[in-house]
Image (cartoon, rainbow, N blue to C red):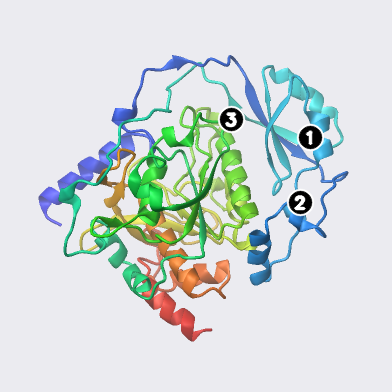
């Protein structure tokens, strides 16, 4: 890397750190008064799941056939966390003054919204309630986020690479030997990926996305957006890294996979309730039978200081969202999560849920040789001493497609993660007998830093072709 290249990356990094992950300077709009008035959202902890019509003997009432087959294939038993929240308890808690806006079966919790914080005090008297926590309070003003910029109907001819089938995405896939999986027709077919993000601007309108197998969308934020396709294009970029298939322009890492687009990130505020939204999205992904989740989200600091996560929370089992993430492999799903972009700030460390157990946390390296860690890429270890990140991939910069339909470059562990996620789907397609935990270990052990893993590069850049060859031998 020459001096000018280093200068460009440093300036890009400084700009990136100075802006929110999902909001860039052109997205900034004039702030407006919050129109719903003062209100609060509490997480209500329930004591049990009694008086419920649901039973583990009849799981087809709350989990899809695909979800059950995934667990059966990996010999994973259902347990009480899989049972839905008791409908009777929901009826006991809901009233004209208390609006139930969300729930988690894994944690046996509800989200309730009230205009008067004293209204939740009466819930303490109910025997089914074991505790509560304030996770959101209305702001005085917000910046509107839903908007629809114009988009291109086709890629710029200058982006065409006549000698490169992968076009602009060539290097980020070849660096992980992912193209060799594609060469044997392992392109993610039969796999289902949930993308948990903040919005997918213009995915419904940009022609290149029309060929993507999108199974559905869900918005878990309260109140929901008029449309997830008008929110941030962060999710658009993330999806493009996996799903697009435009030869000589841009090919993603899993162009034959099916996708669910799930919104959990509220850009108008940054509060702990987003951990509940993320959990609800992950539970939904489980219920419809997704095999993998890509999450390019992370949290440590909120608008209200009492909600912040101190360093000691980074043990994979303290933060609400990390507890959820640590359960995924035991449900048979593989989570690929970005490490975070705090490397140049005072925090520096990974953010939750990147600290979770049994997931792949992905840091970012430069796109040119020798591939060095990006200055912004968050570092480990977890608070209980585990190596983090687990692996790294190109993310400084990565080629992506934005909400205007342009092929462009952007910085972030947010974009290293989906490059890995798509190839993990291809690898799992090739090795369908593997469990989620076996996939995690296999990918880690093909990293180019596997002999001496550390808390900057983790196990290094994985070699997905080597993982395939090793996985075949071990069958």
Real-space Cα separation, disc 2 to disc 3, in angstroms: 23 Å
x 46%, y 60%: residue: 257
x 51%, y 70%: residue: 439
Q: How many marks?
A: 3
Do we see residue 378 in this rendering? no
Q: Residue 259: horizontal and vertical position, in percent?
A: 49, 53
x 35%, y 40%: residue: 345
For the N terminus, the image quarter is bottom left
Mark positioned earlier in the residue sequence (2 or 3): 2
Q: Residue 164: horizontal and vertical position, in percent?
A: 20, 64
Q: Residue 278: horizontal and vertical position, in percent?
A: 56, 43
Looking at the image, residue 166 lies above or below residue 294: below
Q: Residue 48: horizontal and vertical position, in percent?
A: 82, 45
Side of 170 relative to 6 (left or right): right
Residue under label 2: 83
Q: Are marks 1 and 2 in contact (CB under 8 Å)?
A: no
Residue under label 3: 222
Real-space Cα separation, disc 1 to disc 2, in angstroms: 14 Å
Residue under label 1: 90
């Amino acid at each position: 890397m020459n001096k000018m290249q280093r200068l460009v990356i440093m300036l890009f990094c400084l700009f990136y750190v100075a802006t929110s992950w999902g909001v860039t300077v052109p997205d900034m709009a004039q702030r407006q008064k919050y129109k719903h008035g003062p209100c609060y959202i509490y997480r209500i902890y329930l004591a049990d799941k009694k008086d419920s019509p649901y039973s583990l003997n009849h799981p087809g009432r709350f989990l899809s056939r695909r979800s059950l087959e995934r667990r059966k294939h990996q010999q994973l038993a259902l347990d009480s966390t899989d049972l839905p929240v008791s409908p009777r308890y929901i009826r006991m808690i809901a009233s004209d003054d208390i609006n139930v806006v969300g729930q988690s079966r894994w944690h046996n919790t509800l989200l309730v919204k009230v205009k008067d914080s004293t209204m939740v005090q009466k819930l303490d008297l109910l025997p089914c309630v074991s505790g509560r926590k304030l996770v959101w309070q209305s702001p005085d003003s917000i910046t509107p986020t839903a908007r629809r910029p114009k988009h291109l109907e086709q890629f710029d001819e200058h982006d065409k690479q006549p000698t490169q089938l992968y076009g602009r995405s060539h290097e980020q896939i070849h660096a992980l030997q992912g193209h060799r999986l594609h060469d044997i027709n392992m392109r993610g077919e039969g796999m289902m990926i949930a993308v948990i993000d903040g919005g997918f601007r213009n995915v419904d309108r940009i022609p290149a996305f029309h060929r993507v197998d999108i199974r559905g969308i869900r918005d878990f934020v309260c109140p929901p957006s008029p449309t997830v396709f008008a929110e941030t294009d962060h999710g658009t970029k993330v999806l493009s890294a996996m799903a697009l298939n435009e030869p000589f322009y841009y090919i993603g890492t899993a162009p034959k996979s099916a996708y669910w687009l799930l919104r959990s990130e509220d850009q108008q505020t940054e509060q702990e309730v987003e951990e509940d939204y993320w959990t609800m999205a992950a539970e939904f992904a489980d219920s419809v039978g997704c095999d993998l989740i890509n999450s390019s989200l992370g949290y440590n600091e909120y608008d209200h200081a009492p909600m912040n996560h101190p360093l000691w929370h980074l043990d994979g089992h303290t933060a609400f969202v990390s507890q959820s993430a640590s359960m995924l492999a035991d449900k048979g799903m593989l989570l690929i999560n970005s490490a975070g972009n705090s490397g140049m700030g005072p925090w520096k460390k990974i953010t939750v849920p990147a600290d979770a157990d049994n997931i792949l946390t992905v840091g970012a390296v430069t796109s040119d040789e020798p591939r060095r860690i990006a200055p912004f890429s968050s570092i480990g270890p977890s608070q209980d001493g585990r190596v983090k990140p687990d692996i790294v991939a190109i993310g400084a910069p990565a080629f992506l497609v934005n909400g205007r339909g342009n092929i462009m470059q952007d910085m972030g562990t947010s974009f290293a993660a989906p490059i890995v996620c798509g190839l993990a789907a291809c690898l799992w397609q090739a090795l369908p007998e593997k469990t989620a935990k076996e996939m995690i270990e296999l990918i880690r052990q093909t990293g180019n830093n596997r002999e001496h893993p550390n808390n900057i590069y983790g196990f290094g850049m994985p070699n997905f072709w080597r993982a395939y060859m090793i996985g075949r031998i071990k069958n």
